[in-house]
Image: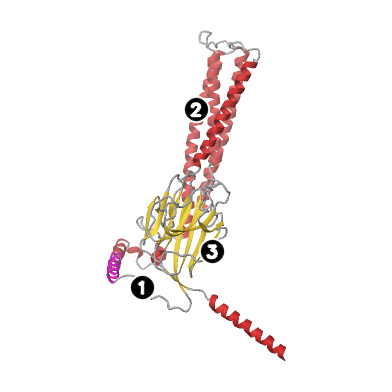
């Protein structure tokens, strides 16, 4: 009995410990989306600006993304929140693409939380000696240790200068090797700062699954400023990549059991009145436009709105017909050009026939053989032209039938290729005729070719040694030049 009592007590203790651990660490914090510190497409940019954000340098905002830097050398750009963030706990989700043509890229992309906006500087396009934390996606291997691309977490109190030559390895608080360049899907990073612990998760972009995150690194006892700005920056050096950010989503975290922060007054009263007035003006203008449209188009009154717009199938059908019409016009144009070529070919045949009748047998057997060659070539060209003309006529007829029966358009590549072949045949015939005329001209008209100088008997040993020495010097010069070019391509700050 005593043994059973001890076992039961031990089981109860273990259950209590597990329940306490589950209760203390198993509950997830409450997340609240903060739209004033986020951006996401579509309609990301309006009139070249980003709501609640500021962009500098070579950053180019568009409707679906922000291109921080284009794939040009020595470019820098960044985007930063306009207002500071004073959340105790937060989580940021960033989706981006880093793409380039080369096997390696440069320099990289950085995600920031700093006490001040680092609008411009040498650290991935942002200011050095920052006060806060930076998560760097480094593409270029400066120290030559073959440890890039990599994700690096570097903290700074405003006094440290970033160690570029060693890729920040001497200052890194956490790092992981991740290849984030040229992925089929956007790469995603989830950065969580909760209870003074910074955690970085990475989605490598191999699958379209957005929540397929892998652990990258974790920094405990991370002290950051209580208030700061979020930012994203990028830079290129001797090598270049496109650095595109698709979205930046910020969430405010609240510990379980704590009172949720009160909802902020998102829009002041003055702004609400302003937006309401703009909406009413827009609504009145829309109603006015509708009335004008109904007056101009009385036949569409009473019809459903779906009938007034082009459906997807109608648009595809229209595009098919337009493509067939264009092909039809191209074939007609080829037919006209072919008729002109036939006329020119017949004229060449008549000229050759007259030349044969004038000269007769005076030029001898050589002229007769050359004339036979030219005539056989002409006959072959004429046969090809007739076949091509028949093909074009059949294509025109088939295309006309296909347009009535909604048949796909015909390609014109083979027809154009035949046309190019015929043009080459015509050039050959013209060269042959010119050659015959020149050959049958008088002796005074024939150009005299200069006599060739006598060739040397053989290559001397001295000439061979000189050639070898020159080639060796050229090889050494090219090797030194190539080494200097590779050293210049490596970035130094």
Q: Secondary structure at mark 2?
A: helix
> Residue 203 location in percent, x, y?
54, 61
C-alpha span from label 3 to label 1: 32 Å
Q: Which residues are magenta?
A: 269-287
Residue 449 quadrant: top right
Q: Is residue 270 above or below residue 326?
A: below
Instruction: Find disc 1 in the rendering and name its residue.
Output: 264
Pick the front one: 300 or 46: 46
C-alpha span from label 2 to label 1: 84 Å
Q: Is residue 393 above or below residue 53?
A: above
Q: Is residue 228 left or right of residue 401?
A: left
Residue 87 quadrant: bottom left
**Label 1: how many residues lie within 10 Å, few (<14), some (14-19) or many (20+)?**
few
> Residue 105 location in percent, x, y?
52, 48
Pick the front one: 13 or 491: 13
Q: Secondary structure at mark 1?
A: loop
Q: Residue furthest top?
A: 444
> Residue 99 location in percent, x, y?
51, 51
Instruction: Find disc 2 in the rendering and name its residue.
Output: 344
User: Between tags 3 and 2, which lies in front?
Assistant: 3
State the residue at coordinates (60%, 79%): 18
Numbered label tally: 3
């Amino acid at each position: 009995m005593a043994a059973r009592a001890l076992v039961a007590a031990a089981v109860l203790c273990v259950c209590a410990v597990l329940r306490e651990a589950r209760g203390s660490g198993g509950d997830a914090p409450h997340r609240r989306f903060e739209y004033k510190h986020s951006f996401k497409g579509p309609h990301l940019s309006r009139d070249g600006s980003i709501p609640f954000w500021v962009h500098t340098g070579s950053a180019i905002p568009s409707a679906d993304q922000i291109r921080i830097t284009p794939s040009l050398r020595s470019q820098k750009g960044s985007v930063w929140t306009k207002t500071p963030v004073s959340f105790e706990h937060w989580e940021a989700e960033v989706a981006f693409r880093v793409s380039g043509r080369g096997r390696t890229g440069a320099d990289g992309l950085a995600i920031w939380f700093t006490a001040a906006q680092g609008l411009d500087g040498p650290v991935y396009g942002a200011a050095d000696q920052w006060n806060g934390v930076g998560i760097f996606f480094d593409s270029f291997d400066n120290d030559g240790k073959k440890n890039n691309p990599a994700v690096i977490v570097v903290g700074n109190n405003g006094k440290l200068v970033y160690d570029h030559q060693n890729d920040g390895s001497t200052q890194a608080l956490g790092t992981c090797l991740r290849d984030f360049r040229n992925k089929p899907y956007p790469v995603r990073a989830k950065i969580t700062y909760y209870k003074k612990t910074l955690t970085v998760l990475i989605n490598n972009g191999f699958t379209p699954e957005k929540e397929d995150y892998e652990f990258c690194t974790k920094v405990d006892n991370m002290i950051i400023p209580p208030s700061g700005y979020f930012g994203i920056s990028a830079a290129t050096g001797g090598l270049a990549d496109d650095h595109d950010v698709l979205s930046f989503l910020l969430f405010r975290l609240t510990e379980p059991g704590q009172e949720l922060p009160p909802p902020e007054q998102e829009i002041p009263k003055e702004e609400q009145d302003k937006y309401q007035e703009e909406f009413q003006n827009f609504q009145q203008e829309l109603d006015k436009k509708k009335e004008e449209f109904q007056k101009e188009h009385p036949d569409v009154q009473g019809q459903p709105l779906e009938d007034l717009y082009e459906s997807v199938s109608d648009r595809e059908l229209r595009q098919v017909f337009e493509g067939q019409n264009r092909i039809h016009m191209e074939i007609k144009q080829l037919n006209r050009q072919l008729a002109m070529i036939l006329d020119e070919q017949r004229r060449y045949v008549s000229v050759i026939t007259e030349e044969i009748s004038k000269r007769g047998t005076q030029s001898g057997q050589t002229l007769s053989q050359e004339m036979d060659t030219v005539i056989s070539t002409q006959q072959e060209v004429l046969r090809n032209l007739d076949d091509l003309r028949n093909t074009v006529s059949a294509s025109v007829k088939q295309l006309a039938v296909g347009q009535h029966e909604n048949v796909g358009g015909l390609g014109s590549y083979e027809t154009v290729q035949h046309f190019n072949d015929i043009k080459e045949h015509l050039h050959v015939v013209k060269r042959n005729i010119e050659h015959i005329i020149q050959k049958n001209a008088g002796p005074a008209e024939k150009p005299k070719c200069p006599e060739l100088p006598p060739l040397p008997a053989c290559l001397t040993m001295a000439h061979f040694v000189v050639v070898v020495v020159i080639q060796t010097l050229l090889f050494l010069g090219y090797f030194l030049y190539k080494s200097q070019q590779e050293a210049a391509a490596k970035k130094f700050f």
